[in-house]
């Protein structure tokens, strides 16, 4: 959003601003001495910067996707913010490398195709039709302007063309198909004996709990927390304060009338007589004359579709009476399109020549092309104008706010009072989680930066999604502290019980494996352990009833050459399983087409990743520490 605002400052105003700010910087170098200047990029790929804002947007989208996968909340143990952000940055670097390569190889998508793809997306539609208001709202929620999104979408589509080209060349050999069928259809006969952990069977003394607490004090610390004061400026709030004159609405409607016109579709049929390469002008004229004779028959009352089936040399439409279906501008070659969109319904064209040959075109029907009335688009236009005017106003407000926050860096209150903004205070939050304004990763990162946290100064402008800008400073700080023993004693007790059970199980399991090698069988051990022996019979690789860790172990075990094969598994919860493998059956005769297709897809994915790795290894990449990003 800030870039869009800056783009509006042009002409003599821009030169005046540059002159005014250059004088103090030239005389005193204030910006350099205080560590100002352009924001540090997250990474640079072949000389092209990935901005910290791009990283923040990508990270926010990644977290949102993870939250959807896990039902709304990302599990605490899934990975901290730094790990996830590094992963997102790696993906962005790979995207940049791929996009740069696609550009060098001249992968492109045209304007008409881009427009068609965007309009076909269901998340931009209302009642099955593209809706400009929905489109803008969806983009705004992601922090995009229409121009920015369309540019990014164009880039993505060009990369998809490259990905499609790589995937289309993937293949597997017949011998691989056979091997794959043999392995994927393989079944293994097993019996499983599991010794569970009964935590209640173990006692943990108070001394053991305290000793563990003292020895692992670092595990039981509260996270460092802060509260922040903040000022927020949002485009939505500025828009609500803007009045739009009626004459301005009408002027914008008349100026952009074309954008409120739905795409026009023309249903047409044609008769094609092809031209061979290098055909002389006289021969071409003979083909044209033949087509003119066919047109005369149509004018005389002959059925166009019947003549198309008899004479047309277009293999795709001749059998269907020359029917081409609905045609939108940009779908056909220029001479054909020009003639078609100048015709009236029911009209048959004169012979038209294209690179494919000579055509007769019949226009069957016209649909679309409707211009939405002013009343229909009034709300959209008003929102566009409000956004434009609000962006201009917000530029001045943010500039003033930035100056005041810098000049009086020990408090945000003077800036709030002078500009009439509400000074708000957050709840307590830490580096990883927060509520309210602290839900924003960028806010948390800057709150815990050296300048804001340790030096106690006001932050620079922090641009967030939804066209929001905030300035923050530390209100209170709560350093890490040792959690009291009474708050963690139950958790420590449960952990020690679990560890005791795990160790006892591992010892019993090791002894049982040795006994099996000396002739003892699973029935004997089941009796010793007082547990039931489970005969699973033959299990397949896609078995869903068996514990998946156990299933993976089963298919890693060596085939029994003579007798039985045994192995063991310690489960995450401390349970211990003994596995007996007695037989393996392979079958390469049943070749599942869906599985082979999946294998081909996997091969395509491997090819794509290989290309990506090669491109990334050749790229010049400079990554900056996340802790230094603003």
Image (cartoon, helix red, strand yellow):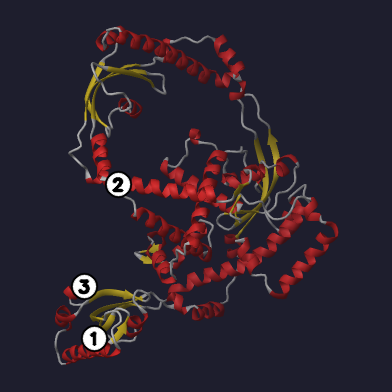
Give the residue drawn at x 75%, y 57%. 403
Q: Looking at the image, is mark 1 or mark 2 earlier in the sequence?
A: 2
Quadrant in which the N terminus is drawn: bottom right
Q: Looking at the image, is mark 2 or mark 3 earlier in the sequence?
A: 2
Q: Which element type, helix, strand or loop, lies under badge 2?
A: loop
Where, by quadrant of the figure, is residue 299 drawn?
bottom left
Where residue 445 appears, x then y in whole percent?
63, 43
Where residue 575 appears, x then y in whole percent?
38, 18
Circle 3 packing at 10 Å, graded few (<14), some (14-19), many (20+), is few
The residue indicated by pointer 3 is 315
The residue indicated by pointer 1 is 346
Q: Is residue 441 left or right of residue 546?
A: right
The residue indicated by pointer 2 is 172
State how far apart marks 2 and 3 are (Cα).
Answer: 32 Å
State how far apart marks 3 and 1 are (Cα).
Answer: 24 Å
Q: Which element type, helix, strand or loop, lies under badge 1?
A: loop
Give the residue drawn at x 56%, y 54%. 465
Q: Which element type, helix, strand or loop, lies under badge 3?
A: loop
Question: Is residue 529 placed above or below 120 in the rendered structure?
Answer: above
């Amino acid at each position: 959003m800030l870039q869009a605002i800056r783009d509006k400052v042009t002409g003599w105003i821009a030169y005046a601003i540059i002159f005014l700010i250059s004088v103090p910087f030239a005389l005193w170098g204030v910006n350099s001495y205080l560590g100002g200047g352009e924001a540090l990029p997250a990474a640079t790929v072949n000389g092209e910067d990935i901005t910290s804002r791009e990283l923040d947007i990508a990270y926010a989208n990644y977290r949102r996707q993870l939250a959807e996968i896990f039902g709304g909340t990302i599990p605490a143990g899934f990975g901290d913010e730094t790990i996830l952000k590094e992963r997102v940055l790696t993906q962005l670097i790979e995207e940049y490398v791929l996009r740069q390569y696609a550009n060098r190889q001249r992968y492109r998508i045209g304007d008409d195709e881009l427009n068609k793809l965007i309009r076909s997306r269901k998340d931009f539609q209302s009642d099955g039709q593209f809706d400009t208001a929905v489109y803008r709202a969806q983009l705004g929620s992601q922090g995009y302007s229409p121009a920015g999104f369309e540019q990014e979408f164009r880039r993505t589509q060009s990369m998809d063309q490259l990905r499609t080209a790589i995937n289309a060349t993937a293949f597997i050999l017949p011998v691989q198909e056979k091997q794959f069928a043999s392995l994927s259809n393989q079944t293994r006969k097993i019996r499983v004996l599991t010794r569970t952990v009964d935590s209640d069977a173990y006692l943990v003394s108070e001394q053991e709990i305290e000793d563990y607490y003292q020895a692992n004090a670092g595990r039981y610390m509260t996270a460092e927390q802060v509260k922040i004061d903040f000022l927020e400026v949002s485009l939505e709030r500025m828009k609500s304060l803007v009045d739009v004159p009626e004459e301005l609405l009408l002027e914008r409607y008349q100026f952009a009338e074309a954008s409120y016109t739905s795409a026009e579709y023309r249903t047409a049929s044609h008769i094609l007589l092809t031209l061979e390469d290098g055909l002389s002008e006289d021969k071409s004229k003979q083909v044209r004359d033949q087509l003119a004779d066919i047109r005369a028959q149509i004018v005389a009352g002959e059925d166009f579709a019947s003549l198309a089936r008899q004479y047309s040399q277009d293999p795709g439409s001749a059998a269907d009476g020359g029917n081409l279906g609905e045609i939108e501008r940009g779908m056909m070659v220029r001479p054909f399109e020009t003639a078609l969109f100048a015709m009236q319904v029911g009209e048959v064209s004169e012979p038209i020549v294209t690179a494919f040959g000579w055509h007769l075109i019949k226009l069957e029907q016209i649909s679309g092309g409707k211009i939405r009335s002013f009343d229909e688009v009034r709300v959209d236009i008003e929102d566009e104008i409000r956004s434009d005017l609000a962006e201009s106003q917000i530029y001045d407000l943010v500039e003033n706010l930035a100056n005041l926050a810098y000049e009086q860096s020990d408090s945000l209150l003077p800036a709030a009072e002078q500009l009439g903004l509400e000074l708000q205070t957050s709840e307590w939050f830490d580096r990883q989680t927060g509520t309210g304004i602290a839900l924003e990763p960028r806010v948390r990162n800057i709150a815990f930066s050296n300048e804001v946290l340790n030096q106690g100064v006001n932050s620079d402008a922090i641009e967030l999604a939804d066209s929001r800008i905030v300035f923050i400073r530390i209100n209170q700080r709560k350093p890490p502290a040792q959690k009291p023993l009474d708050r963690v004693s139950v958790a420590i007790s449960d952990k020690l019980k679990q560890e005791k059970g795990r160790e006892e199980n591992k010892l019993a399991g090791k002894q049982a494996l040795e006994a099996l090698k000396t002739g003892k069988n699973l029935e004997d051990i089941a009796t010793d352990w007082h547990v039931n022996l489970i005969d699973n019979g033959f299990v397949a690789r896609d078995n869903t009833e068996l514990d998946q860790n156990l299933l993976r172990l089963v298919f890693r075990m060596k085939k029994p050459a003579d007798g039985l094969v045994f192995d063991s598994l310690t489960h995450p919860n401390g349970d211990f399983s003994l596995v007996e493998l007695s037989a393996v059956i392979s079958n390469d005769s049943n070749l599942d087409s869906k599985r082979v297709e999946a294998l081909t897809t996997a091969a395509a994915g491997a090819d794509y990743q290989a290309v990506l790795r090669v491109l990334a290894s050749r790229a010049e990449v400079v990554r900056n520490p996340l802790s230094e990003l603003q």
